Amino acid sequence: MATTTKAQEASTTPFSDALRVTEGFVLADRDPHSTPAFDGDKAAGQKALAAADEELDDLQERLYARSRVGVDRQRVLLVVQGMDTSGKGGIMRHVVGAVDPQGVQLTSFKKPTEEELAHDFLWRIRKALPEPGMIGVFDRSHYEDVLVVRVHDLVPQEEWEQRYDVINAFEQELVDDDITLIKVMMHISPEEQKERLQERLDRPDKHWKFNPGDLDERAHWDAYQEAYQAVMDRCSPPGAPWYVVPADRKWYARLAVQQLLLEHLRQLDLEWPEADFDVEAEKARLAAM
Ligand code: AMP
Ligand code: MG
């Protein structure tokens, strides 16, 4: 048997352990420029990202195969939240984009439509939950209903205040239904956001990404950080914790989210499903043809 190294003994889920939000977490204390659980540079980070694509692809196929054959109903839901320019789009392109598109259900949540507003805030969320065997990805989520909604009092405070408990009950339901929930906050600094907004203004090929409304939201930076802190305080139970990913370095944030996904998939023990037919008999039949 191979000897285990010190690093392996230390932890098999280093990114999850380093980034998980537990009781007493203070958002302002997490440095957006840091690279927890990784001590390499940008080049090493990009290499590590590419090197893990194959395993991610393999695990996704196992997840899918098991649901097709009916072994189990497991699925994964990756929730990605963050301020404008925090790199959510890059996660979709560089991390989620490496997975077989047939195994992914991606939903971007925008300002609710009139139809959506006529329903309970979880209505559109429930409709977008992944089927068994799938990896669901939310670009923004039900948390907008306690973030942008709280910052701008889009509903009365009595109403948004109740939503934290509603969200906890909802997520417990998901976990009980074999959904592995991975909630990720892309954590950038206001200085980094300013640079990224500046770049969107300076480069004609990035103008399409700029929304003048982003500047209005930026003006509420502190209120948003408070709202995120409240989410971490109230909606990060041990069974459905948040992971706060330092996101000032895009290469690190992408690697971290990929590794969070991998670490959670590995824990599902995704053995290939056994054939529900007699393999030897079928081989013999084929050989005789
Ligand atoms: P983006 O993700 O940058 O394309 O922008 C989507 C916009 O929709 C963001 O400004 C969000 O804050 C906004 N949004 C998403 N969900 C909600 C919600 N439940 N209520 C109000 N605005 C929302
Ligand atoms: Mg935007």
Image (cartoon, grey):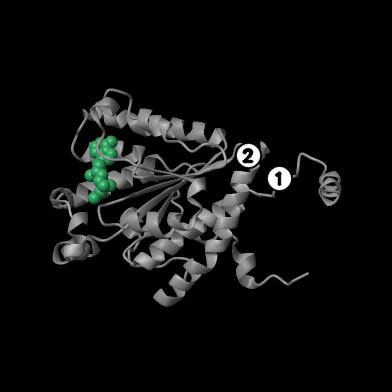
The residue under the point 34% across, 63% down is 31
> Of 162 and 173, which appears nearest the observer?
173
Mark 2 lies on residue: 68
Residue 13, image quadrant: bottom right
The answer to whether one can see residue 147 in this image is no
Task: Using residue 216 as the reference point, say whether residue 259 is left or right of it.
Answer: right
Mark-to-mark CA distance, 1 and 2: 9 Å
Which label sits on residue 273? 1
The answer to whether one can see residue 55 in this image is yes
Task: Using residue 161 as the reference point, say whether residue 276 is left or right of it.
Answer: right
The 10 Å Cα crowd at callout 1, few under 14, some 14 to 19, many 20 or more, is: some
Give the percent coordinates (x, y) of residue 265.
Answer: 57, 51
Give the percent coordinates (x, y) of residue 270.
Answer: 65, 49
> Of 144 and 276, which appears nearest the observer?
276
Residue 140, image quadrant: top left
Q: How many labels does the image show?
A: 2
Residue 112, image quadrant: top left
> The residue under label 1 is which amino acid type?
Pro
N-term mark: 1 or 2: 2
Task: Using residue 42 as the reference point, say whether residue 218 is left or right of it.
Answer: left
The residue under the point 27% across, 40% down is 110
Task: Using residue 114 as the reference point, say whether residue 12 is left or right of it.
Answer: right
Q: Mark 1 near mark 2, Cβ–Cβ under 8 Å?
A: yes
Label 1: state its secondary structure.
loop
The image shows residue 187, relative to residue 168, as above or below, that is: below
The residue under the point 74% across, 71% down is 2
> The residue under label 2 is which amino acid type?
Arg
The image shows residue 191, relative to residue 79, as above or below, that is: below
> Of 230 and 200, which appears nearest the observer?
200
Give the percent coordinates (x, y) of residue 66.
Answer: 65, 43
For the N terminus, the image quarter is: bottom right
